[in-house]
C-alpha cells in the first residue's frame, strides 16, 4: 500500500496548474447517458473516482476512451439495455449515484445501489429519490437497491429540493438530468448553487437542453425530445485551488496558481486575507498567493456555496494550527467531519472538539509523525501539515487523496516540497 514520506521545512515557490474539477466532471460524465452521438470532455482529471465512473459507465453501455496525458475524454452510448448500477462499483464512490437521473430519463428504468465514499458523516439520498418520484418515477426497494420505473416517461413538475441541512448538490444534479427529457417544465426550488451545478447546466445546454437559473436557488428546465453530443471544457477544481492556496500560506511560500477561477473562491480569499496571507489576482485564470509572516487566528464556519466550503475545512484547520492565537472552526455541512483532528494532534497541534466546533489553539511548530489518512480532504490536511512539520511525516492510506487530487506529490515536488510516494 502506498504512503507519503514528507520532510518538512521547505518554502514552496513556483507555478502550479489546477486540474479540471472532479465534482463537475462526475455528473457531466453521467449525463452523457442522455446524449445521442459523441461527447468530448476536456480537462477531465485522472483520478481514482474518475476511473471508477468510467468503469460504471462502461457497464451501462457507454464507450469511453481517453487521450493519454491531455485530459481529453470521449464518450458515446452504444448499448442501452443495462440499467443496473451495481453495488460492486457504487459502494466505492458516492458520486456514482448521479447515474440515477440519466438512466431513468433515457431508459425509463434505473436500479442503483446505495452509494459509498468517504466516511465523513451521514449523507442520505432521500432527496434524490424524492425528486425522481416527483417527476413521475415509481420507487421501490429491491435486494438492497433502489429501483425506479418510468414506463410512460417523466413529467415536469415543481419541487422543493432541500433537506434539514440545506440544498443537495448531487440531488440537484440528478433532478436536472432527469428533467431535461421530461415532458413539460420542471422548477427546482432551493436548488444547490455550487459552480459544479452551473457547469452541469451549461453542459446540458451545450447538448441541446433548455436549462435556466443554474447558479441560483431556482432552476427552470424545459423538457426536450433528445440531447446530442458536444465538445465541452470542464471548469477548474476550486478545492484543489484552495488546497494550493493554503499550501503557499502554511509554508510561507509564494505560488502562482494557474487555471483557477477566483470568482468561485471569494469566501476562501476572505478568510485567508484575515489570517495575513497575500493574494494577488491576475487575469480571471491566475492568482499569486504568498505569506512571509506569522498568521492571525480567524473563525471559520462551513456553509453551502458561496460560503466557506466544507471540502477545505480540514486543510484550513491545518493552517490555523500555526496561527498566533485561538481560532474556532465550525462544521455546518457534515458535523462529524473531524477525523483529522486526532492525527493533527499527533503532530503537536492543540485541537479541542466541542460538538460541531473545534477550538484551534495555535502552536509555534508542528512535529513530523506517522499519521493515517481517514478521508480525501483529511489526507490533504495531513500533507499540508507535513510540509511544515519538523522532521519526517509518514502518511498512510493515501489512496484517499488519489480520489480527488491529480498527481499531488508531483505538483508539490515541482514547487520544492520534499515528498515521496513509497510502498509499505
Image (cartoon, rainbow, N blue to C red):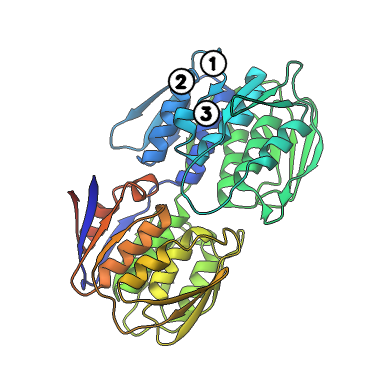
Residue 274 in the image, given as x and y percentages of width and height? 49, 80
SS for tag 3?
Answer: loop
Query: Which residue position holds label 2?
Result: 59
Q: Earlier in the sequence, mark 2 or mark 3?
A: 2
Label 2 packing within 10 angstroms: few (<14), some (14-19), many (20+): some
Q: Nearer the viewer, residue 188 or 1?
A: 1
Q: Earlier in the sequence, mark 1 or mark 2?
A: 2
Residue 410 in the image, given as x and y percentages of width and height? 23, 52
Query: Which residue position holds label 3?
Result: 230
State if disc 2 and disc 1 touch (CB < 8 Å).
Answer: yes
Query: Which residue position holds label 1?
Result: 82
Asked if residue 23 can be seen in this view, the reply is yes
Tell me: residue 35, above or below residue 373.
above
Q: Earlier in the sequence, mark 3 or mark 1?
A: 1
Asked if residue 207 can be seen in this view, the reply is no
Distance from disc 3 to disc 1, alpha carbons, whole Å, reads 24 Å
Amino acid at each position: 500500500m502506498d504512503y507519503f514520506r514528507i520532510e518538512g521545512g521547505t518554502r514552496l515557490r513556483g507555478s502550479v496548474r489546477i486540474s479540471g474539477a472532479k465534482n463537475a466532471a462526475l455528473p457531466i460524465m453521467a449525463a452523457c447517458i442522455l446524449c445521442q452521438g459523441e461527447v468530448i470532455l476536456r480537462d477531465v482529471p485522472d483520478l481514482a473516482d474518475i476511473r471508477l465512473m468510467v468503469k460504471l459507465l462502461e457497464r451501462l453501455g457507454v464507450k469511453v476512451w481517453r487521450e493519454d496525458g491531455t485530459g481529453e475524454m470521449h464518450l458515446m452510448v452504444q448499448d442501452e439495455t443495462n440499467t443496473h448500477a451495481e453495488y460492486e462499483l457504487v459502494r466505492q464512490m458516492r458520486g456514482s449515484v448521479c447515474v440515477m437521473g440519466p438512466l431513468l430519463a433515457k431508459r425509463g428504468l434505473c436500479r442503483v445501489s446505495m452509494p459509498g465514499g468517504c466516511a465523513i458523516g451521514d449523507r442520505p439520498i432521500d432527496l434524490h429519490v424524492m425528486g425522481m418520484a416527483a417527476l413521475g418515477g415509481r420507487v421501490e426497494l429491491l435486494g438492497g437497491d433502489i429501483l425506479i420505473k418510468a414506463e410512460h416517461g417523466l413529467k415536469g413538475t415543481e419541487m422543493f429540493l432541500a433537506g434539514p441541512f440545506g440544498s443537495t448538490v448531487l440531488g440537484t444534479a440528478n433532478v436536472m438530468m432527469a428533467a431535461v427529457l421530461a415532458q413539460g417544465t420542471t422548477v427546482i426550488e432551493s436548488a444547490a448553487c455550487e459552480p459544479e451545478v452551473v457547469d452541469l447546466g451549461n453542459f446540458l445546454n451545450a447538448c441541446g437542453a433548455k436549462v435556466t437559473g443554474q447558479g441560483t436557488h431556482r432552476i427552470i428546465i424545459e423538457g426536450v425530445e433528445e440531447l446530442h453530443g458536444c465538445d465541452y471544457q470542464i471548469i477548474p477544481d476550486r478545492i484543489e485551488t484552495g488546497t494550493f492556496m493554503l499550501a503557499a500560506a502554511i509554508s510561507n511560500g509564494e505560488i502562482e496558481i494557474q487555471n483557477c477561477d477566483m470568482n468561485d473562491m471569494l469566501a476562501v480569499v476572505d478568510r485567508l486575507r484575515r489570517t495575513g496571507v497575500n493574494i494577488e489576482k491576475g487575469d480571471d485564470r491566475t492568482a499569486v498567493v504568498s505569506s512571509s509572516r506569522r498568521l492571525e487566528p480567524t473563525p471559520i464556519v462551513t456553509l453551502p456555496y458561496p460560503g466557506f466550503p466544507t471540502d477545505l475545512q480540514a486543510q484550513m484547520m491545518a493552517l490555523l494550527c500555526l496561527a498566533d492565537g485561538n481560532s474556532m472552526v465550525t462544521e455546518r455541512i457534515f458535523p462529524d467531519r473531524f477525523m483529522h483532528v486526532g492525527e493533527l494532534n499527533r503532530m503537536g497541534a492543540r485541537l479541542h472538539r466541542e460538538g460541531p466546533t473545534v477550538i484551534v489553539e495555535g502552536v509555534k511548530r508542528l512535529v513530523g509523525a506517522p499519521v493515517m489518512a481517514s478521508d480525501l480532504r483529511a489526507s490533504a490536511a495531513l500533507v499540508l501539515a507535513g510540509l511544515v512539520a519538523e522532521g519526517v511525516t509518514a502518511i498512510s492510506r493515501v489512496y484517499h487523496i488519489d480520489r480527488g487530487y491529480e498527481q499531488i506529490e508531483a505538483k508539490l515536488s515541482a514547487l520544492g516540497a520534499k515528498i515521496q510516494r513509497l510502498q509499505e
